[in-house]
Image: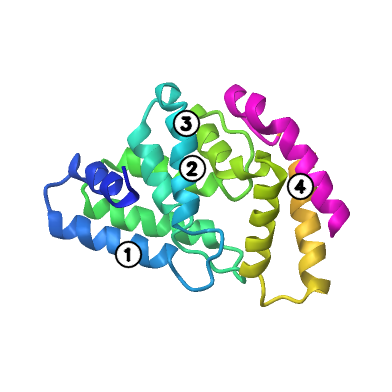
Amino acid sequence: MNLKNQFENLCFSFTEDAQLISRLWKEIETQYSERGRHYHNLLHLDNMFMELEAVKMNISDFRAVSFSVFYHDVIYDATSKSNEEKSAAKAEKRLAELHINQDIISIISEQILATKSHQRSDQEDTNYLLDADLSVLGKDFETYLKYTQNIRKEYSIYPDFLYKPGRKKVLKHFLELESIFKTEYFKEKYEARAKENIAKELQLL
């Protein structure tokens, strides 16, 4: 199922207002298709859903996690340090228009905010979201390399002497985490390869 259909089906379980749903989808599509987005785009969302499909039965509220996927990078500016906060605020506003229960909106907002620091959560649904978000780190090195090139393009405003130290800091942060992946499934699938990939990239920087 393509992302548009997936989003529409998700919304239809809360409202029958097709015009509203269409407007919300248009906004998501436009945001993720912005010119400077080489990695944080619709393909990233697609990949996350592909990863989550395999663990769907372990997720207690898949609808909430799905909304978190759609909105977690809806605001993305490489020069900003508050993308997650802005994305969470945007999600809260839009989901309120769908008349989603406030408790569920709060959960979604917290999940989006969790993608900022990628610390283990005591909410297992959040951990699955975080792991899907970082799954590219554990792919084959060719795919990983393509990802690093796309990230570099997103930060093309910064010259190497500024970009490289920042990138090193991010990579070291991942290696300093108790484990990059929080759930057993993703840890088993990607942890070892992710650490290898990151170590290789650090050597290249």
Q: Is residue 59 above or below residue 35?
A: above
Q: Residue furthest left?
A: 16
What is the spatial separation of the Cα atoms under label 1 and label 2, in whole angstroms? Answer: 19 Å
The mark that comes first in sequence, 4 or 3, is 3
Element on which disc 3 rests: helix
**Of the pair 129 and 35, the residue shown nearer to us:** 35
**What's under tag 1, amino acid-wise?**
Glu
The mark that comes first in sequence, 3 or 2, is 2
Magenta stretch: includes residue 62: no
Taking the image as drawn, is residue 100 in sight?
A: no
Disc 1: which residue: 27
Q: Residues within 10 Å of mark 4 (few under 14, many from 20)?
A: few
The mark that comes first in sequence, 1 or 2, is 1
**Of the pair 103 and 36, the residue shown nearer to us:** 36
- Horizontally, residue 191 falls left or right of residue 95, namely right
Dot in front, 1 or 3: 1
Element on which disc 1 rests: helix
Q: Residues within 10 Å of mark 3 (few under 14, many from 20)?
A: many
Disc 4: which residue: 173
